[in-house]
Image: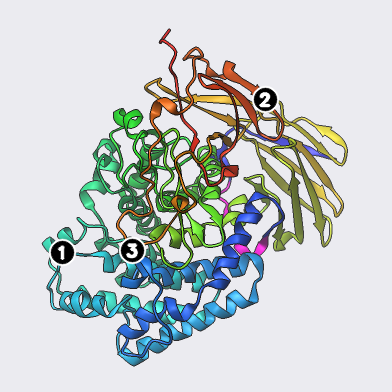
Amino acid sequence: MTRLFLTLLVGALQAATWLPPEDVRLTPGPFFDAQEMDRAFLHELDPDRLLAGMREAAGLDPKASRYGGWEKRGSGMIGHYLSALAWMSQTTGDDALRARLDAIVAEMAEYQKHSGQGILFASPWERREWFEPLSRGDLRLSNVVPWYTLHKTMAGLRDAWLVAGNPTADEVLRRLADSCIDVTAKLTESQWKELTTKEFGAPGEVLADLWRQTGDLRYGELAKRFTKFETRDSLATGQGDILAGRHANTEIPLFLGYYKIGNIDGNPVWEDAAVHFWNEVIQHQTFVFGGNSIWEAFIPPTEAETKLLDDCGPETCNTFNLLKLTRSLWEANPEPRYLDYMELALHNHILTTIRSQGAFTYYTPTRPGHYRRFSRPFDAFWCCVGSGMENHAWYGSDAYAKDSDRFWVNLYLNSAARWPEKGLTLTQKSTFPDSDLHLFDLKLDQPAEFTLSLRRPFWAGEVRVRVNQQEIDPGHGDRMEIRRLWSSGDQIELHLPSSLRSVITPGGHFASFFDGPLLLAAPLGDQDLEKQDFRAGGEVDFEQLGRKRMDLEKAPGLLTPRNDPRVALRPLKGGHALLKTDQGEIEIKPFYQVGDERYSVYFPLRSPAP
């Protein structure tokens, strides 16, 4: 007998845990395609070239020359690569990538042994000109990027250890963290405050993980040192307006670290700051596809409509790090708003940021009629190439969670997920947006009673659920909870009808359109652009930014009533629609399907105000 329990108060549910990557496999679909492009690039990269600067800094001859672009001067790419290998090898079962991970960790252990130091420097310059003076109490503020790159190395080792299970990575990371304690021992309070005025990454978020795993308070004390206390305390009391003008990708990972510290420390100020920060960024800083910042800085919310016309749009790293914070917040408090953001950002920002093998985008412009530049594979190595390598290995783990007696389906993407404790393998299949039907097939080692919890997206219309051909009442909560004795061969049919909807900017001058979770964009061709305009390296400052503007007047606008621009839409199949504009009727389609061309996701409202 099927028993259906409706979830009206999600906060009353038991806290859940995301499925580990080894328990989810993506199957063919847009997210699988992005994952496989990324995986191919991970295979194509040469670890010896990524390790060249670190090996030289340890006093050993490099085995290969460094890559170009940002990597030429030590970008910390090896840390991103190590994290990507950890997640990708686990979620795909790719033994060759796992072998690379093990070899890199062994190399890092060798560097520590040879140099006699725990810190793994990205370049000889970092060791000679920055960390050695720092150990004497000499803080050089001209450049604190070394902490940024070191954070990436620490995170890579953390993931190699905790995600991929490499025990040597634990040892290497502890030696590195111990050296960080030693090298900062002579810094004064005022020097710590000076250091945290720059972009320094977020070593504290890894140190907090190390504190939790080992119980060693020394790591916790150092984690707290990497804190902007004035900013933390302001956000803890809800004063989000102080964010305007601050470098976004400095702040976001710091608040992830604050949240982790609060989980262990028990002082509510840490977690309160992180929650209020997340709310502020989502409500006042986030553009229509889930990204934030213009020119890498948070903006005054009242200037959003002006700022979205700039050439420079949200940075991919920001969304990468905000998703990390969102995952942590949801795991402790499974509220629907966190999953709403994850769905928005994954479909409409992260999925759009990989164009082909090794081609990742740094900025996603919001300006109507603008375009993106993607990295050339071996001479860019921007920060967003590093986060890009990681982004597309996470999708499977984002879709599912579990608690002691409940299996959570949080995102709808083609995949197969395992719940070993119950002997369950659940396969999810859909052709969305071509169809609103999502099929779930269950395979169990033996019959088991548990709750299958399906997310009801806010955008879904009249939801229909059938279990083994039997219609059941989906209720009205934000989750559909089906508890029964499940057996192999059980099947669920879930219909999530979507419809076209519009979103208008707070100032009322621009509209955007969605089909369900998918942001729709107008592909506008390659007017005044050459093939090379869509690719860039890393030798020239801001080479990753497209500079060839289309006049705003040439971008399509709307003459519809400002209070209901949907009247300009005519639906087509597969998430496409026809949009009536002041330049004629044009076809719009899911943003992730837009290629090397100009596009618009914001449409100026050019009709008179009502």
In the rendered view, tell whether residue 294 sits above or below residue 256.
above
Residue 134 position by quadrant: bottom left
Q: Which mark is residue 571?
A: 2
The residue nearer to you, when weighing 122 against 219, is: 122
Q: Which mark is residue 539?
A: 3
Give coordinates of residue 300: x percent, y percent.
28, 34
Whether 17 is among the magenta residues is yes
Which residue lies at the image location 19% right of the left edge and 76% below the top edge?
A: 129
Label located before the other in sequence (3 or 2): 3
In three-dimensional space, the C-alpha distance between marks 1 and 3, rounded to whole angstroms, equals 24 Å
Give coordinates of residue 410: x percent, y percent.
62, 45
The residue nearer to you, when weighing 61 against 145, is: 61
The answer to whether residue 266 is left or right of residue 16 is left
Give coordinates of residue 255: x percent, y percent.
35, 51
Name which residue type carries label 2: Pro
Q: Residues within 10 Å of mark 1 (few under 14, many from 20)?
A: some
In the rendered view, tell whether residue 442 sits above or below residue 512.
below
Which residue lies at the image location 45% right of the left edge and 44% below the top edge?
A: 529
Name which residue type carries label 3: Glu
Name which residue type carries label 1: Leu
Label located before the other in sequence (2 or 1): 1
Q: Quadrant of the C terminus?
A: top left
Q: Is residue 168 visible?
A: no
Question: What is the magenta range?
Answer: 14-24
Residue 584 position by quadrant: top right
Give coordinates of residue 511: x percent, y percent.
47, 25
The answer to whether residue 347 is left or right of residue 511 is right
Q: Is residue 93 visible?
A: yes
In the rendered view, tell whether residue 488 sits above or below residue 128.
above
Q: Which residue is mark 1?
A: 141
Which residue lies at the image location 44% right of the left edge and 50% below the top edge?
A: 533
Find out whether the residues at labels 1 and 3 contact each other: C-beta distance under 8 Å.
Answer: no
